[in-house]
Amino acid sequence: MNRKKIYNPNSTESVSDRSIFGGNPTGIFELNNIKYQWAYNLWEVMLNNTWFPKEVDMTRDVNDYKNLTDSEKTAYDKALSQLIFMDSLQTNNLIDNVNPYVTAPEINLILVRQSYEEALHSQSYAVMVDSISQNSEEIYDLWRRDMMLKSKNDAIAAVYDELSANPTEHNFVKACFANQILEGIYFYSGFTYLYTLARSGKMLGSAQMIRFIQRDEVTHLVLFQNLINTLKRERPDLFTDQLKKEVYAMFREAVTLESNWGKYITQGQILGLTDAIVEQYIQYLADDRLTAVGFEPIYNVSHPIKWVDDFAKFNDQKTNFFEGTVTNYSKGSLNFDDF
């Protein structure tokens, strides 16, 4: 694949000729005439979801953190460190690795917006770390010192590195699935550990911050689900048996990595999260993400901790965040059916 030209006045590409990648855009964002309506709808949802980390009151968490058990502190710190890594990675990945090859301007819009939101999440974690830690470097350096975390991070980054080193159509589609795994499995798993503390009345400010972050992540997940489903319609030739084999392998590896990580940071000491529940929940997420893009599930398990859904909701919203729907949860009011 070739990177798109930023300014291309010789282009005669019509709206109907636009494509997710491989197109010939002018570089002008002519948003009164678009091809992918779902992308523009999602852009408006993202705008309506605008928020800022300092809106969240972290005052109570300062004392709550001091009173956590050693096991709870360990789970909190390591879950937070993992989230910090993933948002850092994703901020750069979207701008440097994915967006340069996307040739539909309405999709460029939402990728840029997503990258902004990932950067905002990094600020959110900084607010959380500064609120509860007397030594912020201790949490930020965990990715260097904890070999379990580093090996997991290395595996996550590998697929993105593959696209960067060899930007082919095949690797682009694989990267879309990798984003689905990152947004829909790894992030959701990390959020769950923090919601578990909130369920017992601890770290409620942190849980509220995660609610805002997860509200963004729902749109990110929908973004890549729509990219994959659109590519399936427009470029079915890309969805070869080899690609499907690699995608299933990626999901199986993700489930193994995240299940092992979850068991490692909870150590069976976090109330409500046994090793069996952690593993089943990760398997459930994997199946849900696969079926959303028309792939067969691998594990066929039920949702073992449905109470998590309640912690992901705002009181005035009807959306179940773990269903990945985004029809009624923005600060504004939008009605559309093109998702």
Image (cartoon, grey):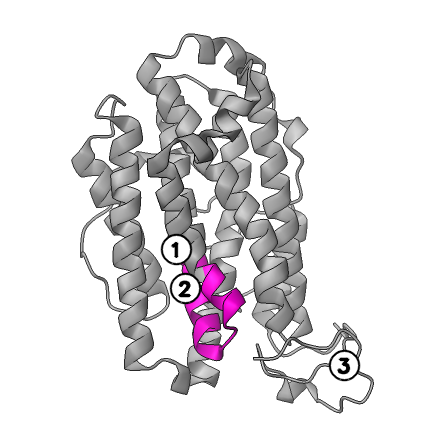
Magenta segment's dominant SS is helix
Percent of width and height locating residue 145: 42, 30
Q: Dot 2, crowdedness within 10 Å: few (<14), some or many (≥20)?
A: many
Q: Considering only vertical position in the picture, is 332 above or below 148? A: below
Residue 305 within the magenta-colored segment of the rendering:
no
Q: Which residue is drawn at 46% across and 58% down?
A: 179
Q: Determine if residue 120 is in view.
A: yes
Q: Is residue 15 shown left or right of residue 169?
A: right
- The residue singled out by tag 1 in the image is 181
Q: Pick out the residue farthest to the bottom.
A: 12
Specify start and end residues of the magenta stretch as a single range.
160-181
Q: Dot 1, crowdedness within 10 Å: few (<14), some or many (≥20)?
A: many
Q: Do the residues labelled 2 and 1 touch (CB within 8 Å)?
A: yes
Most foreground residue, 81 or 36: 81
Q: How far apart are marks 2 and 1 (CA)?
A: 6 Å
Q: Is mark 2 on a helix, strand or loop?
A: helix
Residue 175 within the magenta-colored segment of the rendering:
yes
The three-letter code of the residue at mark 3 reads Thr
The three-letter code of the residue at mark 2 reads Phe
Q: How far apart are marks 1 and 3 (CA)?
A: 32 Å
Which quadrant does the N terminus fall into? bottom right
Q: Is residue 99 shown left or right of residue 300?
A: right
Q: What's the mark number on residue 234?
A: none
The three-letter code of the residue at mark 1 reads Ile
Percent of width and height locating residue 219: 53, 54
Q: Considering only vertical position in the picture, is 189 above or below 35? A: above
- The residue singled out by tag 2 in the image is 177
Q: What's the mark number on residue 26?
A: 3
Q: What element carries label 1?
A: helix
Q: Which residue is drawn at 25% across and 22% down?
A: 271
Number of callouts: 3
Percent of width and height locating residue 25: 71, 81
